[in-house]
């Protein structure tokens, strides 16, 4: 009887060992999302021959007459909407999608949401609406396009839905001065400290290297046309960093000045625009 019990104990222990080894061999599975199509920047769409210069010219010509664009049907709008939420870790309740037509089986849309709206709130008040993109062999031709053009997303549907890795959360969120103030992240006294001229702007890093690396990583992760070059710092208010991000794809070489007014405070701005970067842990409860 004792021998039988010993054999049974050996068998049980062996099975447990195999089970533990099998569990130990399992690697964490990557969380995925289902998507119906792919988002491209205008440059990527041009490089991949999805849209032509004639298509881009049509978009530009009819920006003020959107009724000339091919309408976005409900099914396609729903797929683009779902894809946007699936492929962006942060999407605010204020997300808006504007149709810019259909081209060679692709849809051109302009998306504004909580995380990717750095420029959109002030563009309409700027005294000019074009800038020149310097040509290189790999870039679009030397054509003046409206500023909104470089924030378009070109969506092309797959033959069948696919699984993609779920996007990870960014380190922080970029806000315009107006939105940061409206949401309570900047106080009136902090707004008043922002210099009216350029004498206080500096290339010198005034945050620790880890924070600067996070800011750069977040900016490069934005899915519109970005070509990061440098940060101009204005100041740090608690953990909020006020700055301009110099992006060669989005700047005004003439340095045209315009003014914004926030709660009666008049502020001077240029392109690249002032923005506020706030660590994700400070706003996580609000946006998730």
Image (cartoon, rainbow, N blue to C red):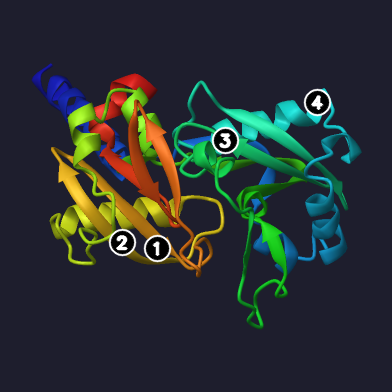
Horizontal side of 143 relative to 164 (left or right) equals right
Query: In which image quadrant can residue 78 be found?
Result: top right
Q: Where is 98 relative to 140, above or below? A: above
Label 2 sits on a secondary structure element that is strand
Picture coordinates of residue 273, whole percent (x, y): 42, 51
Q: Where is 47 relative to 37, above or below? A: below
Pick whichever of labels 2 and 4 is earlier in the sequence: 4
> Which residue lies under the disc numbered 1?
246
Pick whichever of labels 4 and 3 is earlier in the sequence: 4
| Circle 1 or circle 4, nearest the eye | 1
Picture coordinates of residue 215, whole percent (x, y): 30, 52
Q: CA distance from mark 2 to mark 3?
A: 23 Å
Label 3 sits on a secondary structure element that is strand
| Circle 4 or circle 3, nearest the eye | 3
Q: Is the residue under label 1 in contact with that under label 2 (CB below 8 Å)?
A: yes
Q: CA distance from mark 1 to mark 3?
A: 21 Å
Pick whichever of labels 1 and 3 is earlier in the sequence: 3
> Which residue lies under the disc numbered 2?
231
Horizontal side of 52 relative to 229 (left or right) equals right
């Amino acid at each position: 009887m004792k021998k039988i019990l010993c054999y049974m104990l050996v068998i049980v222990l062996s099975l447990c060992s195999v089970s533990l080894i099998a569990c130990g061999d399992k690697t964490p599975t990557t969380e995925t999302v289902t998507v119906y199509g792919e988002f491209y920047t205008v440059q990527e769409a041009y490089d991949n021959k999805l849209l032509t210069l004639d298509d881009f010219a049509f978009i530009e010509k009819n920006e003020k007459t959107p009724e000339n664009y091919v309408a976005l049907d409900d099914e396609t709008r729903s797929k683009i909407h779902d894809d946007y939420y699936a492929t962006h870790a942060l999407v605010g309740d204020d997300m808006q999608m504007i149709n810019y037509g259909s081209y060679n089986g692709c849809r051109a849309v302009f998306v504004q949401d909580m995380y990717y709206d750095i420029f959109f709130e002030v563009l309409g008040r700027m005294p000019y609406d074009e800038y020149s993109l310097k040509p290189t062999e790999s870039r679009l031709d030397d054509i003046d396009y409206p500023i909104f053009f470089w924030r378009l997303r070109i969506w092309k549907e797959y033959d069948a839905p696919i699984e993609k890795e779920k996007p990870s959360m960014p380190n922080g969120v970029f806000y315009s001065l107006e939105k940061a103030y409206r949401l309570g992240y900047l106080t009136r006294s902090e707004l008043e400290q922002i210099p009216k001229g350029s004498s206080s702007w500096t290339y010198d890093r005034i945050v620790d290297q880890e924070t600067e690396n996070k800011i750069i990583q977040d900016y490069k992760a934005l899915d519109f046309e970005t070509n990061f070059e440098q940060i101009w710092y204005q100041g740090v208010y608690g953990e909020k960093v006020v700055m301009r991000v110099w992006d060669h794809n989005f700047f005004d070489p003439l340095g045209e000045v315009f003014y914004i007014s926030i709660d009666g405070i008049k502020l001077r701005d240029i392109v690249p625009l002032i923005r506020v970067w706030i660590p994700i842990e400070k706003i996580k409860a609000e946006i998730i």
